[in-house]
Image (cartoon, rainbow, N blue to C red):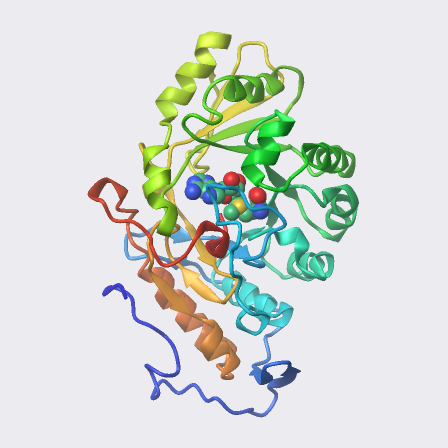
Amino acid sequence: MPTNVRRFDLEDNPGNGIDRGAKKNHRSLRTDYGQIHIAPAPEQFASEQMHDSYGRRIHYLRISLTDACNLRCVYCMPEQMAFQPRHELMTDEEILFLVKVGASLGVEKIRLTGGEPTIRPGVVDLVRNIAAIPGVQDLAMTTNALLLDRLAGPLAAAGLDRVNISIDTLDANKFHHITRWGHIDDLWRGIEAVEAAGLCPVKLNTVVIRGFNDGQDVVDLAGLTQERNWEVRFIEMMPFGQVSDFQQTNVVSYQEIRQTVEAEFGPLEEVSYDFVDPSRPFRIPGAKGTLGFISSVTEPFCQGCGRVRLTADGKLRLCLLRDDEVDLLTPMRGGASFEEMRSLMREGAFHKPWGHGLANGVFANNRAMNQIGG
Ligand code: SAM
């Protein structure tokens, strides 16, 4: 338990004024794990801004819709992964409630992730309802694209603005190997559907792993941008939990990835950007699309981070690479009011750590990536 973050749950804060029982106007929902009481959330609300103790404005919420996935990427989770029982995960009503809480505190940008967000039942309706919340200006999703063949159109119609698609190699056999179960043809069909649905610009995310895809695969992926107006983003692998040894040993730095690309295509051209996006953009001379480098490990970009995350089990995670979390699910299920939940989120975000501690040997240990949402 980190010392700089208060835990907000009913057990630790019995005197916090939050009542487990149903209150007048609360919506009582019968679930397979009992009755829960969710306070009413207003349809309209005044919005203020929230900041952390370093003055960074927190405006971006990434939500893990499920910890489950239809793939088992070797660097992300074990093949025999045990997922959390459904009753421990947020319901649609709870997600919408917390998005409203965030929006009332100046959250403008939402990204849905997982696990694999597209496998959540009712994901299209959930997207429609999130997109309709006042203040939500940008709604994106990170996905493996396997189900986008049939979902891209409905998701776009429901209000999704963009998708980031994860792909670590163009080689079908390697793709199957790294995802343990995946077929790359499904991903290509998904990308076609994304373009047809206008979920553009297409962004591809590649985690680079030493000895696996740090050579010709990087070159082939970068080469996609020559003829397509896509952004291919290379991500340094980040160490987490029980697989952190493997991840540390096999991290490939941004500098190395860039050298590999430049050895093939020549010096990259810089592309102007807003310094908010963690991905630094470049272009192969003459290419239609761009390349991005996300150097989370070797050159962190914590000073510009305005993100917090909501895990599928309703914890506000303050930094991807630190264990600090604030329990929002328990008080919400206990009937905390909209105002009380706003205070919990605002105060939690205030305690966002400055940055990760990888350089000092501090690793996040309490969860794997699929549980946090990348
Ligand atoms: N299933 C979706 C997908 O494949 O995009 C969303 C969840 S996945 C956890 C989100 C992103 O995290 C993917 O791009 C994945 O490659 C990346 N990722 C997983 N483990 C990682 C790690 N240790 N370091 C860096 N990125 C990682």
Which residue ends up furthest to the left in the rendered image?
A: 360
Is residue 268 visible to the viewer in this orientation of the structure? no
Q: Position of residue 94 (x, y in %)?
A: 58, 71
Is residue 242 visible to the viewer in this orientation of the structure? yes
Q: Position of residue 222 (x, y in %)?
A: 55, 20
Which one is nearer the viewer's eye here, 78 or 304? 78
Residue at image location 63% in from the left, 42% down from the top:
181
Left or right, 153 with reference to 219: right
Q: Quadrant of the N terminus?
A: bottom left
Q: Position of residue 349 (x, y in %)?
A: 37, 61
- The image quadrant that residue 189 belongs to is top right
- Compared with 311, 169 (above or below) is above
Residue at image location 57% in from the left, 27% down from the top:
169
Residue at image location 46% in from the left, 56% down from the top:
309
Q: Position of residue 11 (x, y in %)?
A: 36, 83
- Compared with 238, 172 (above or below) is above
Which one is nearer the viewer's eye here, 284 or 247? 247
Counting the numbered discs, the total is: 0
Which residue ends up furthest to the front in the rendered image?
A: 80
- Compared with 2, 225 (above or below) is above
Which one is nearer the viewer's eye here, 41 or 278? 278
Left or right, 256 with reference to 35: left
Residue at image location 63% in from the left, 86% down from the top:
28
